[in-house]
Image: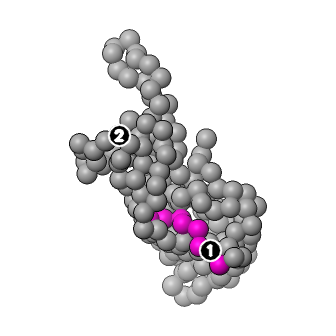
Amino acid sequence: AYYPYDEANDGKEVTALAGVVPAKQTMGEQIPADYKYGELKGVDENGGYKFKFHNIFSLVRFKIDATGSDLEGKTLEKVTLKVTRDNGASPALTGDFTFSAADGIYTLGETSNMISTLWDKKLEGEISSFATVFPEVKEGDKLTFTFSTGESNIVFTVTSKVDFEPEK
């Protein structure tokens, strides 16, 4: 079993399914491209199957509080994240892939080292949401964020303190 279901995978081998983590993800109630594979745990009393689902990719939580800043009260249109390494490499964040619904093993196809999260939210107090990215970011990678309101952009770079992993 896997989630989210895609009829384009009908008839394919369970180990050769296709998916996309989009480079543009709309922030809101649902987590975009939240791919999971299911581990069969048994059958219930009605004959239904029980699965434990595991994330294949990493979830990045964007938690933004613009209180007291120049952005307070403005509408956040998007946040762009770009990842680079000191050696010039560009780890993949988004793109297409094939995966196995049996064990979650994936192979990347065409990828990008950027993601744009689309918000359309007024910056009042704290706002937050999740995005899905490939777990390719490593400790020491440079994460450059660009916050765009339509009126202005704020850019800053931080160093990742952890290796990104699928949520457990």
Relative to 55, say whether 119 is above or below: below
Q: Which residue is mark 2?
A: 14
Report if residue 100 is visible in the image: yes
Relative to 64, say whether 45 is above or below: above
Quarter of the image where the C terminus is located: top right
Relative to 4, say whether 27 is above or below: below
In the rendered image, residue 62 lying in the magenta stretch gets the answer: no
* Residue 84: image location, x then y, percent: 64, 74
Q: Identify the residue at horizontal 59%, vertical 60% (top origin).
A: 136
Q: Identify the residue at horizontal 33%, vertical 15% (top origin).
A: 47
Q: Is residue 160 left or right of residue 33?
A: right
Stretch of the chain drawn in magenta: 88-95
* Residue 75: image location, x then y, percent: 53, 76
Judging from the image, the colouring scheme is: one colour
Magenta: main secondary structure: loop
Tell which of 8 and 115 is nearer to you. Answer: 8
Q: Which residue is mark 1?
A: 89
Residue type (three-letter) at the residue carrying disc 2 = Val
Earlier residue among tags 2 and 1: 2
Quarter of the image where the N terminus is located: top left
Q: Identify the residue at horizontal 58%, vertical 56% (top origin).
A: 135
* Residue 24: image location, x then y, percent: 44, 69
Q: Identify the residue at horizontal 24%, vertical 44% (top origin).
A: 10
Residue type (three-letter) at the residue carrying disc 1 = Ala
Secondary element under disc 1, as helix, strand or loop, is: loop
Tell which of 128 and 102 is nearer to you. Answer: 102
Give the CA distance from mark 2 to mark 1.
32 Å
In the rendered image, residue 89 lying in the magenta stretch gets the answer: yes
